[in-house]
Amino acid sequence: MTDRKAELAANLAQVEERIASACAAAGRKRDEVTLIVVTKTYPADDVRLLHELGVRQVAENRDQDAAPKAAACADLDGLRWHFVGQLQTNKVRSVVGYADVVQSVDRDRLVTALSAAAVKAGREVGCLIQVALDAESGARGDRGGVAPDGIEELARLVADAPGLRLDGLMTVAPLAGEYADRQRAAFGRLMDLSTDLRRAHPAANMVSAGMSADLEEAVAAGATHVRVGTAVLGVRPRLG
């Protein structure tokens, strides 16, 4: 085993222990929470090592990094790519070429562009509505995301759009507003919004929340997916 693979294996084991402990503390089964490793800024070689170690879900936030990396890893069986960054419509065609799930859907125009690209590519792309818990009514968050009162309309657009599948909700713990430094409360609010969403869209049961620093709070609140980067891959230079 190479030094890098051993490092990743040790880090994965620590993250796995954290998730398992958080599930136990919350009275949840371990298989209720899926780990997505955020590989942004890390090379395709690391993705290949992670795959050898059993990781099957990875995430990226910039198409210019993700597209060549996904192409370099196209031979890996069962690998699913999540796009988690703010997505401009001029990047949609490229992202639809490799992303199985886009977690950052936050406006009508993006839904329209994703649908057109998915249909043209003959693919079905899963979509999460990104929720900005610090956004005012009708506005978008500083880091993307729709205000809570915009979820219903956007979800309907996704559900009705050809080539798209409404999978659920995603959030990033806010840096400002009433939920700043209150990750557990923020993730609890997201779970309430998920309950509301599932009344109209029962299959949209994915809740993506929590990162390296706050995955325990996300698991405690009920998140189904956690997005972990630094705790697995460490601190490395940016690509390019």
Image: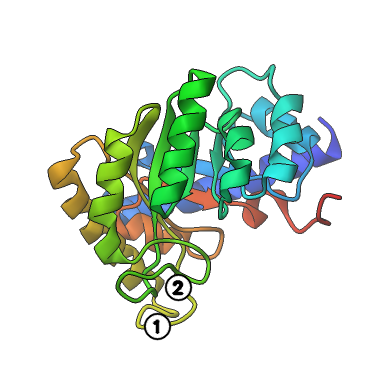
Q: Nearer the viewer, residue 11 or 157?
A: 157
User: Which label belongs to residue 177?
Assistant: 1
Which residue ends up furthest to the left in the rendered image? 199
Amino acid carrying mark 2 in the image: Pro
* Disc 1: CA contacts within 10 A as few (<14), some (14-19) or many (>=20): few
Q: In this orientation, does residue 104 appear?
A: yes
**Compared with residue 180, is residue 1 higher up or lower down, i.e. above or below?**
above
Estimate the x, y position of residue 52 in percent, counting from the top left: 68, 26
Residue visible at 13% across and 46% down in the picture: 199
Drawn side of residue 150 relative to residue 2, left or right: left
Residue visible at 43% across and 80% down in the picture: 180
Estimate the x, y position of residue 95 in percent, counting from the top left: 60, 36
Residue ID for mark 2: 174
Q: Nearer the viewer, residue 175 or 217?
A: 175
| Spatial CA span between label 2 and label 1 | 7 Å
**Compared with residue 192, is residue 73 higher up or lower down, i.e. above or below?**
above
- Element on which disc 2 rests: loop
Estimate the x, y position of residue 45 in percent, counting from the top left: 80, 33
User: Which label belongs to residue 79?
Assistant: none
Residue visible at 70% across and 35% down in the picture: 67
Q: Quadrant of the N terminus?
A: top right
- Residues at badges 2 and 1 in contact (C-beta under 8 Å)? yes
- Element on which disc 1 rests: loop
Res 56 quadrant in image:
top right
Q: In this orientation, does residue 13 appear?
A: no
